[in-house]
Image (cartoon, coloured by chain):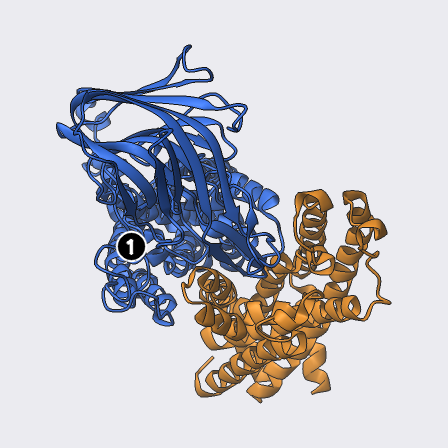
């Protein structure tokens, strides 16, 4: 397993694009988060704003880049035929997938930590200038606040789970374009259908089931009790999606010729 | 002899450079890759299926065709009355009227407009308090009978918007601003001459100002004319994460009229008070006629206005929710139509056969655009019909719109899918990696929509997202326009886009043209 991990790390490290994708994930996450934080001012909203969630808006964009990274880790090998060599070196296919999953999630956790901390820092700097001050009942974003800490750590874990989910789908589907289409389709369709579905109960059900809608609940710090599914339970739903995708990927990898 | 040897030309060359030939070869490539044809079929299928799934959970209020609890003279919200322009309307008010044969006019003085509204938006169930809705209406009306949705013209005072002349639900002309009171009354006059209705106002009953003259086509010779009062429901929209709900509360307005003057052929009989019922139903609508001083005190609920789209999902375009799924599939197909050539080295053959690279891209764009447009048209038309029927059967309110609007929504959505696929194709030509290109296209088109309708962003930034990003194109689906004379929460969440339908579509087209330009330049400059 150690050799397999080392092999996967070498591959990911030396493939052109990994560094760029990680940089893009960090930069785009922080950019969208900062943009969202600066676009909202206290006076322009009538209701209470969840400043923590607002400051972490960029995760919804960063996850797409992380998905590319994870999908490419598998589909790239199929495209170039590298997968044949990988499996010759590590014949136990589940081991290869596990090694890939470990490496990709470690890399994602690292990039995700930078991206989320950068986003929270940007929010901390920008939000007070927009009227989200103590005078209006808002505190500075800080890790000392339990809910904000949970949202931040949860967002990093969210990105790692998205990476695992994408990896599993890619192992099952193999073709990169199709895999990323399936991943983004499953992520993005739930929130849209939930918003447009006419029935409130059905909306709630869809939000509980969707990997993105449920998973991103981990960012919510206000009115938590009104959520369709709680923060950690929501992240658990995403973990189930990731586990199911990885299991499907592992089974298909075992059954098919590479 | 020398000339013949030099003038040899291949018999292939003349049509080999032709664009038609290029199109044919690209079409051959497209149709012979099985995965792409499967993708096209899948796109159409998910468009319909997701729409059905979204509608499936619903158990609407109008099961059984909408007859339900509503009485015979009360139209239910399930089958909203339709105005002369074909749009769904609210048409509920209290009407104190007499028939008028032929031309004539009526003059009245309004000395007060008061009402009862919910006291607190936070707790609307609390005891109502005095107050007037901003679009409470009281004034004079000429109407083609008392059936809901029939043609009318009216001049009125309103709660917050001064004197207004409105006709046939969607038209609104502003007169003198300011509220009405005993110390500052308004005289209103409504006169009919053929199909022309003129509304005038005055602050002293002597100096008159014309607010407007409107044309009501096909008005019968005898119409109902009189005083009316309406007060729209008080709407409270609570926004929560990824959704919002609107509660409406019935309100009442009461107006005092006197100095009634009539010209023309009026019957000698008394005034008739009628409740033209809107969705509000009967609440404290009443009239009182004091014969001694000619004062009328009229109370009414309801509204006379076009219906608007709400977050509860009552528009025809909501049947097209599956288009988002179809869009993602078509983006994948559009992208791989070029990235697969790079992957397999096919692009070198393609470019050797047709060295003019710009034309290759144009041919690919034409093929992808045509195929996805036809697919999109089949998919959206089927989803529109099937999901729409299912929603009505399950008892959901679907506000009717004109056939022309339906056509624009369906054809426009197909065009959106086609342009989005071309956009994805050009991104594929720029990036050359499928996963990155597919993600870029989806993130640019779909993610802004999600951020606008299902995130913590308030409506201001949300509207900006739907102005500048390719997601602006979804405006093509908006079937019910914004009306300045209807107080409502016009946000992306309730289905309102900041740009006009075709303007929003043009934003996506502009992005695509830009990407095409960049792709053409890069395709020429780079080695394949």
Task: Give left or right: position of A221 versus B70.
Answer: right
Q: x and y percent of residue A26 in the render?
A: 71, 57
Numbered marks: total: 1
The shade of chain B is blue
Q: Which residue is mark 1?
A: B380
Q: Position of residue A153 (x, y in %)?
A: 75, 70
Question: Viewer-proximal residue, B50 or B126?
Answer: B126
Q: Is residue B493 above or below residue B185?
A: below
Q: Residue furthest bottom?
A: A92
Left or right: B124 as drawn, with respect to B99: right
For the colour orange, the matching chain is A
Neighbours of disc 1 within 10 Å: few (<14), some (14-19), many (20+): many
Q: Position of residue B255 (x, y in %)?
A: 43, 36
The answer to whether A251 is drawn above or below residue B234 in the figure is below
Which residue is farthest front?
B292
Quarter of the N terminus of chain B within the rendering: top left
Q: Is A197 situated left or right of A96 in this image?
A: left
């Amino acid at each position: 397993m150690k050799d397999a991990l080392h092999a996967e790390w070498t591959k990911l490290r030396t493939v052109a694009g990994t560094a760029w994708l990680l940089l893009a994930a960090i930069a785009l996450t922080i950019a969208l988060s900062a943009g969202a934080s600066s676009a909202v001012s206290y006076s322009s909203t009538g209701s209470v704003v969840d400043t923590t969630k607002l400051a972490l808006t960029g995760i919804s964009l960063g996850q797409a880049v992380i998905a590319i990274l994870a999908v490419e880790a598998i589909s790239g090998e199929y495209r170039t035929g590298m997968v044949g060599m990988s499996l010759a070196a590590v014949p136990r296919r589940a081991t290869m997938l596990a090694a890939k999953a470990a490496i990709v999630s470690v890399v994602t956790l690292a990039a995700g930590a930078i991206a989320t901390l950068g986003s929270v820092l940007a929010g901390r700097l920008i939000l007070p200038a927009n009227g989200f001050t103590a005078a209006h009942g808002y505190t500075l974003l800080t890790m000392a606040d339990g809910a904000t800490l949970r949202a931040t750590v949860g967002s990093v874990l969210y990105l790692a789970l998205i990476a695992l989910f994408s990896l599993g789908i890619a192992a099952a589907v193999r073709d990169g374009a199709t895999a990323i289409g399936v991943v983004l389709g499953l992520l993005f369709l739930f929130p849209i259908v939930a918003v447009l579905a006419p029935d409130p109960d059905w909306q709630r059900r869809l939000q509980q089931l969707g990997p993105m809608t449920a998973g991103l609940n981990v960012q919510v710090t206000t009115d938590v009790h009104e959520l369709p599914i709680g923060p950690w339970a929501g992240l658990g739903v995403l973990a189930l999606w990731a586990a199911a995708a990885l299991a499907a990927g592992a089974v298909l990898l075992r059954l098919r010729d590479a | 002899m020398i000339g013949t040897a030099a003038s040899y030309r291949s018999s292939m060359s003349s049509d080999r450079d032709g664009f038609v030939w290029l199109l044919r070869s690209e079409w051959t490539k497209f149709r012979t890759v099985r995965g792409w044809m499967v993708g096209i079929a899948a796109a159409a299928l998910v468009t319909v299926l997701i729409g059905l799934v979204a509608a499936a959970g619903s158990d609407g209020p109008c099961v059984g065709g909408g007859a339900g609890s509503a009485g015979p003279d009360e139209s239910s919200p399930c089958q909203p009355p339709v105005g002369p322009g074909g749009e769904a309307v609210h048409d509920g008010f209290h009407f104190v009227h007499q028939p008028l044969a032929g031309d004539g006019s009526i003059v009245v003085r309004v000395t007060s407009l008061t009402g009862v509204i919910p006291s607190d938006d936070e707790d609307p169930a609390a005891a109502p308090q005095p107050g007037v809705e901003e679009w409470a209406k009281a004034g004079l009306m000429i109407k083609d009978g008392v059936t809901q949705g029939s043609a009318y013209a009216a001049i009125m005072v309103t709660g917050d918007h001064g004197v207004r002349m409105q006709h046939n639900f969607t038209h609104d002309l502003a007169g003198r601003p300011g509220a009405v009171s005993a110390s500052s009354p308004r005289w209103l006059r409504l006169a009919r001459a053929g199909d022309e209705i003129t509304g005038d106002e005055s602050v002293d009953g002597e100096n008159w100002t014309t607010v407007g003259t409107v044309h009501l086509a096909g008005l019968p010779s005898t119409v109902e004319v009189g005083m009316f009062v309406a007060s729209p429901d008080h709407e409270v929209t609570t926004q929560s994460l990824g959704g919002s709900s609107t509660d409406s509360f019935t309100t009442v307005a009461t107006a005092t009229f006197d100095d009634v003057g009539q010209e023309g052929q009026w019957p000698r009989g008394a005034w008739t008070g009628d409740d033209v019922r809107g969705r509000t139903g009967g609440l404290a609508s009443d009239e009182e006629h004091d014969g001694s001083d000619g004062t009328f005190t009229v109370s009414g609920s309801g509204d006379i206005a076009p219906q608007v789209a709400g977050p509860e999902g009552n528009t025809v375009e909501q049947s097209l929710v599956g288009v988002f799924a179809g869009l993602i599939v078509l983006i994948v197909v559009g992208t791989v139509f070029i990235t697969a050539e790079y992957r397999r080295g096919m692009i070198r053959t393609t470019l050797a056969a047709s060295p003019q690279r710009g034309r290759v891209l144009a041919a690919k764009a034409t093929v992808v655009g045509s195929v996805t447009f036809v697919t999109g048209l089949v998919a959206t038309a089927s989803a529109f019909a099937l999901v729409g029927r299912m929603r009505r059967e399950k008892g959901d309110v679907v506000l009717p719109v004109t056939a022309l609007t339906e056509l624009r929504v369906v054809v426009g959505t197909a065009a959106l899918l086609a342009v989005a696929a071309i956009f994805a194709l050009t991104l594929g030509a720029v990036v050359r990696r499928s996963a990155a290109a597919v993600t870029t296209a989806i993130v640019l088109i779909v993610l802004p929509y999600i951020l606008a309708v299902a995130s913590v962003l308030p409506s201001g930034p949300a509207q900006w997202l739907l102005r500048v990003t390719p997601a602006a194109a979804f405006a093509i689906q908006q079937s019910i326009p914004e009306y300045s004379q209807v107080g409502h929460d016009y946000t992306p969440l309730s289905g309102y886009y900041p740009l006009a339908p075709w303007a929003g579509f043009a934003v996506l087209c502009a992005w695509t043209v830009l990407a095409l330009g960049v792709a053409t330049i890069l395709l020429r400059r780079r080695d394949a």
